[in-house]
């Protein structure tokens, strides 16, 4: 039987007639308002909490899988970056080595030319003397 406002009023009046307005008012305050189709029970709340917990667990699992996937991608990027840096390091090393070899060759050429000029100058000086 559904309780509506009229039924609540009749209960209030009956309680007021037998027990007084204080007791009738206190009883009405303890009853749910009219038109409330269903109140949640502890069992309802437990079911709802279990459903929410299940959804949170599912989200947690999904997030963990995505994080694992991202970690894998980052590891792959690290590997590729390491390879590129090794190639770059090798190229720079080769360029530096080539530049040092060229510089050494130029220095040796300059030294030989300078020594030749000095000998020629000495030869000219001794021939003029």
Image (cartoon, rainbow, N blue to C red):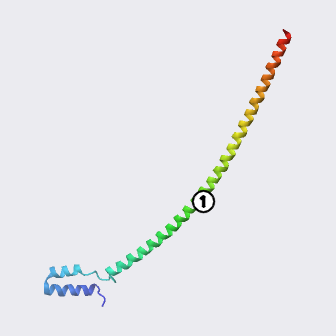
Depth check: give the residue in front, 53 or 45: 53
Q: Quadrant of residue 33?
A: bottom left
* 85 vs 125: above or below: below
Image quarter of the N terminus? bottom left
Depth check: give the residue in front, 103 or 47: 103
Residue pointed to by mark 1: 76
Helix, strand or loop at label 1? It is: helix
Image location (x, y in percent) of residue 55: 45, 74
In percent of the image, x 71 and y 42: which residue is there? Answer: 95
Q: Please indicate whether residue 64 sits to the left or right of residue 80 in the image.
A: left
Image location (x, y in percent) of residue 89: 65, 46
In percent of the image, x 22 and y 87: which residue is there? Answer: 10
Q: As drawn, which residue projects farthest toward the bottom?
A: 1
| Camera sees residue 40 | no
| Camera sees residue 93 | yes
Image location (x, y in percent) of residue 2: 31, 88
Q: Quadrant of residue 14?
A: bottom left
Depth check: give the residue in front, 32 or 86: 86
* 126 vs 34: above or below: above
Q: Quadrant of residue 13?
A: bottom left
In percent of the image, x 60 and y 57: which residue is there? Answer: 77
Q: Please indicate whether residue 11 sits to the left or right of residue 57 in the image.
A: left
Image location (x, y in percent) of residue 126: 83, 12
Image quarter of the C terminus? top right
Q: As drawn, which residue projects farthest toward the right?
A: 127
């Amino acid at each position: 039987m559904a309780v509506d406002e009229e039924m609540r009023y009749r209960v209030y009046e009956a309680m007021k007639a037998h027990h007084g307005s204080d007791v009738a008012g206190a009883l009405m305050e303890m009853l749910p308002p009219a038109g409330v189709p269903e109140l949640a029970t502890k069992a309802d709340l437990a079911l709802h909490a279990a459903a929410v917990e299940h959804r949170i667990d599912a989200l947690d699992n999904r997030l963990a899988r995505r994080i694992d996937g991202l970690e894998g991608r980052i590891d792959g990027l690290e590997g590729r970056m390491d390879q590129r840096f090794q190639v770059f390091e090798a190229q720079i090393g080769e360029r530096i080595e080539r530049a040092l070899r060229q510089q050494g060759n130029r220095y040796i050429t300059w030294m030989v030319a300078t020594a030749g000029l000095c000998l020629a100058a000495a030869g000219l000086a001794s021939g003029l003397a």
